[in-house]
Image: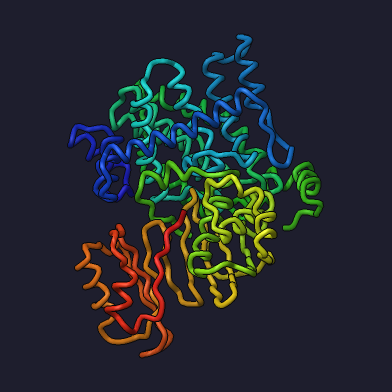
Amino acid sequence: MSFTSLREVIELAEQQNITIAELMIQTEIQQKSIPREAIIEKMAEQFTVMEDAVLRGTTSAVMSRTGLTGGDGYRLHQYAENGKSFINPVTLNAAANALAVSEVNAAMGRIVATPTAGSAGILPAVLVHALDSGKFPRERIVLSMFTASALGLVIANKASISGAAGGCQAEIGSATAMAAGTLVELAGGTPKQVGNAVGIALKNSLGLVCDPVAGLVEIPCILRNGLHAITAQAAADMALAGVVSIIPPDEVIHVMHEVGQQMPESLRETGIGGLAGTPTGKKLKEQVFGEKSSGCGPAKYQSAYEIIGPVMVGPSSSHTAGAVRIGNIARQLLNEQPLYVRFSLMGSFAETYQGHGTDLALIAGVMGLSTMDGGIPKAKSIAEENGLQYVFTKRVLGSYHPNTVLVELSGATRTVKVLASSLGGGKVEVQELDDYPLKFSGERPTLVIHHTDRKGVISELSDILYQKGLNIARMANERSKINGPAITICEIDNQNGEDLLTILKNEIPIIDEILIIQTK
């Protein structure tokens, strides 16, 4: 199942007489060779993180790291309890839930990117709201998260879930569509009704720009999460009532991609235009940072947990979780204690890295921290304690995704250069390794092999992996010259218990070095 067409997803579910959630679960089992129970248990853990974030932000006033925002989830929750609201107080709690999660994110608390951190309030808001209604058991809600992931996979593959690439419609709009379709299936709607909910919700978000004030995932991101949680519920009810999206949802997704491509760079997460460019927006940036304002193709997403996840410390899946993973890949490639690092940032990374905590995330990554590590906000102190010196610069690195960084990392005996992009939702892609144009994500176990170029070496490597029962998911090779230094990248589906590195080294003597890289 490629998850590049919603029509295909709907037709397969109808033909097999199963839910979209079940289709996603079966695909996950096939791809990962993991038992069904383990796959569902992992999703249940994701939902627990969502519940915790909702609870934290609705029962206490959670303030952002900058102090610009906070406490609105708690305020709205309290207001709903007095019964004087224009809309149903119970419905208003869905908006409060979304504000709560977004505020926990802005406070660098633990959330689940769904599909990104900037839009992480919407799906948890409506699912926790559904659980609180008493109409649906927890187990059924956990299963519905696979519906959300399937819908998100189609949007991510067909268009984008990155604000830097497609504006806020790609983040808030995608999350709203995912939540709407999920609610429809949760309520017993048909696969076609799920598709209609996606189309209805996404049409209402077309053209939504990404204009974070001061480059922070706060204004207007937090309030958009709150309002769009209710939009998702309304779109679900429309679809369940029989309202049809006259423009098929796949075409709506395609249009969203086109609109995103036509948006000026100033309205795609750079923190330059839109609300960020207003006098008050500029004043707030100066207040936070003490400075005056200055003026890609979609990723291939395959797994449910690339959309519902990662579990991460906020505030941004692209700028924080993705940055941690890039730094972590560089650390693994260095394969020793880092002592010095230069981070060269471009595009949206360069314009908004301080507000998003990208600097903290990159440092945390090269120090070996993971996306959910509570030490990320203290990364600079940890670096100082471990003797790591760091420098941040801005430069043009080429025609890459706007969230791209060159990491030049040194230890006592080694250096490594990693040019990588954060593509949205915590997904990353290495573009170059030590100036070799080699692409890999680190999501699967990835063999990075430095060797001498020689006829037949790729065949030997493939044969050994086959003999050890390992399946190659992706492979690439680059050399400096014939019979000269070369690097081979080999992504494998799984890693057995044997010492694979030792076996390869012994059986292919021309290998100079071999590492296994996998993002945390």
Counting from the top left corner in percent of width and height, residue 179 is at 44, 32
- Nearest the viewer among 266 and 69 is 69
Is there any visible trace of residue 78 in the rendered image?
yes
Please state the total of marks drawn on the protein image.
Answer: 0
What residue is shown at x 57% (from left), y 61% (from top)?
A: 366
What residue is shown at x 35% (from left), y 48% (from top)?
A: 303
What residue is shown at x 36% (from left), y 21% (from top)?
A: 137
- Nearest the viewer among 334 and 438 is 334
Counting from the top left corner in percent of width and height, residue 110 is at 55, 39
Query: 517 left or right of 274?
Result: left
Examine the image and state in which quarter residue 452 appears.
bottom left
Examine the image and state in which quarter residue 253 appears.
top left
Query: 191 left or right of 180?
Result: left
Query: 398 left or right of 514?
Result: right
Counting from the top left corner in percent of width and height, residue 265 is at 61, 56
Is there any visible trace of residue 266 in the rendered image?
no
Counting from the top left corner in percent of width and height, residue 241 is at 36, 20
What residue is shown at x 60% (from left), y 15% (from top)?
A: 80
- Nearest the viewer among 40 and 221 is 40
Colouring mode (rainbow / by chain / secondary structure / one colour): rainbow
- Nearest the viewer among 318 and 210 is 318
Vertical relation: 399 (above or below) 2 = below
Extreme top residue here? 83
Query: 76 left or right of 399?
Result: right
